[in-house]
């Protein structure tokens, strides 16, 4: 009984207003559908749980990828060490500095979503935590990259290695394939891609990705108008692309306003810290908190990530 009372108290404290509880019930079915295929979400075996490097206008430099709920700031690796690891092969590279950095060291162009200000104003009114966080971090917003294929290809290259190693590896890929289009990757082939330092698995993943783009299996031109789950279904059909990566793509490439990446450990930890005084949080509890963020769960997630950055 005491445990049940404690859980109820925690849940009550995490939401703002009686309407939040109703929203949680109303969205439970939709959230459960979005949370399907639980064990398969961790980047198809890559085990990466991180947030994409991004930053607001007021930041001095882009925030690093987030892992286990905190901003990862990898020490710069010695360039010669990385080059040596690349020359020694994929296994050596991945041993240099393993890290959950699923989307690599992406460079994003600023693209402020047109819904951002409205979302912030709405969230400040309805959520007691975001009422404090949003003004604290000022006019920050997610950044975006335009080219879907390059974004996804770099996500594959950057899996399970540090941002520095991912950048060095991507530079080799760029040198071998300067046009960075699917057709050129397919023409380059397995042997030449592997010569860039890619592991056998990553090489296969990138070629499978390129084949999906070339074959027309993906409705890239329709993604902007397709439902989130339909885009996720297309992306996760590609080897090396799991649900978490697909959700990050929805957030950072398509700028979808209502994505809730429950597999992101940074988000779960931020909810724990901000709403439950650091106590462990279940997916169900996180989903219940997020019900109060509808239809701006992307924006709320962004501020959750920012809340974990060092002051």
Image (cartoon, rainbow, N blue to C red):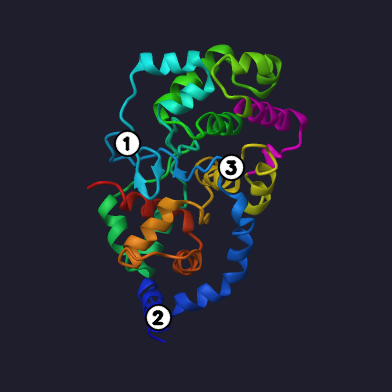
Question: Does 193 sit above or below residue 236?
Answer: above
Residue 230: % across, % down = 68, 50
Q: Nearer the viewer, residue 184 or 71?
A: 71
Residue 121: % across, % down = 37, 61
Compute the Cα span from label 1 to label 3.
Answer: 24 Å
Residue at image mark 1: 73
Residue 94: % across, % down = 48, 27
Q: Main secondary structure of the magenta part?
A: helix
Residue at image mark 3: 45
* Picture residue at 66% right of the left edge, 44% below the top: 236
**Proximity of marks 1 and 3: CB atoms separated by less than 8 Å:** no
Say whether residue 53 is left or right of residue 200.
left
Is residue 217 found inside the magenta-colored segment of the image? yes
Question: Does 243 sit above or below residue 118?
Answer: above
Of tags 1 and 2, the one toward the viewer is 2
Q: Earlier in the sequence, mark 1 or mark 3?
A: 3
- Circle 1 SS class: loop
Q: Earlier in the sequence, mark 1 or mark 2?
A: 2
Question: Does 311 sit above or below residue 28?
Answer: above
Say whether residue 239 is left or right of residue 256.
right
Q: Which residues are magenta?
A: 202-223
* Quadrant housing residue 54: top left
Label 3 crowding class (10 Å Cα cut-off): few <14, some 14-19, many 20+? few
Residue at image mark 2: 3
Is residue 70 found inside the magenta-colored segment of the image? no
* Quadrant housing residue 185: top right
Compute the Cα span from label 1 to label 2.
Answer: 38 Å
The label number, if any, that marks residue 7 in the structure image = none
Label 2 crowding class (10 Å Cα cut-off): few <14, some 14-19, many 20+? few
- Circle 3 SS class: helix
């Amino acid at each position: 009984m005491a445990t049940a009372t404690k859980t109820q108290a925690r849940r009550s404290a995490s939401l703002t207003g009686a309407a939040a509880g109703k929203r949680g019930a109303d969205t439970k079915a939709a959230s459960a559908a979005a949370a399907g295929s639980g064990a398969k979400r961790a980047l198809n075996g890559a085990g990466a749980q991180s947030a994409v490097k991004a930053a607001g206008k007021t930041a001095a430099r882009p925030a690093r990828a987030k892992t286990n709920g905190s901003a990862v700031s990898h020490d710069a690796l010695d360039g010669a060490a990385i080059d040596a690891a690349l020359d020694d092969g994929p296994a050596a590279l991945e041993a240099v500095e393993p890290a959950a950095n699923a989307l690599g060291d992406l460079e994003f162009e600023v693209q402020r979503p047109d819904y951002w200000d409205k979302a912030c104003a709405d969230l400040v009114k309805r959520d007691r935590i975001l009422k404090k966080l949003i003004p604290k971090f000022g006019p920050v917003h997610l950044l975006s990259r335009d080219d879907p294929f390059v974004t996804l290809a770099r996500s594959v290259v950057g899996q399970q290695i540090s941002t520095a190693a991912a950048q060095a590896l991507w530079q080799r890929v760029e040198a071998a394939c300067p046009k960075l289009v699917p057709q050129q990757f397919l023409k380059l082939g397995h042997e030449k891609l592997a010569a860039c330092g890619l592991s056998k698995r990553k090489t296969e993943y990138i070629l499978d990705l390129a084949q999906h783009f070339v074959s027309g299996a993906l409705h890239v031109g329709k993604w902007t108008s397709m439902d989130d789950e339909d885009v996720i279904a297309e992306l996760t059909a590609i080897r090396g692309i799991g649900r978490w990566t697909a959700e990050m793509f929805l957030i950072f490439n398509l700028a979808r306003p209502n994505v809730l990446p429950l597999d992101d450990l940074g988000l779960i930890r931020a909810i724990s810290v901000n709403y439950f005084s650091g106590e462990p949080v279940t997916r169900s509890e996180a989903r219940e908190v997020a019900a109060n963020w509808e239809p701006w769960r992307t924006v709320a997630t962004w501020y959750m990530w920012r809340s974990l950055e060092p002051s």
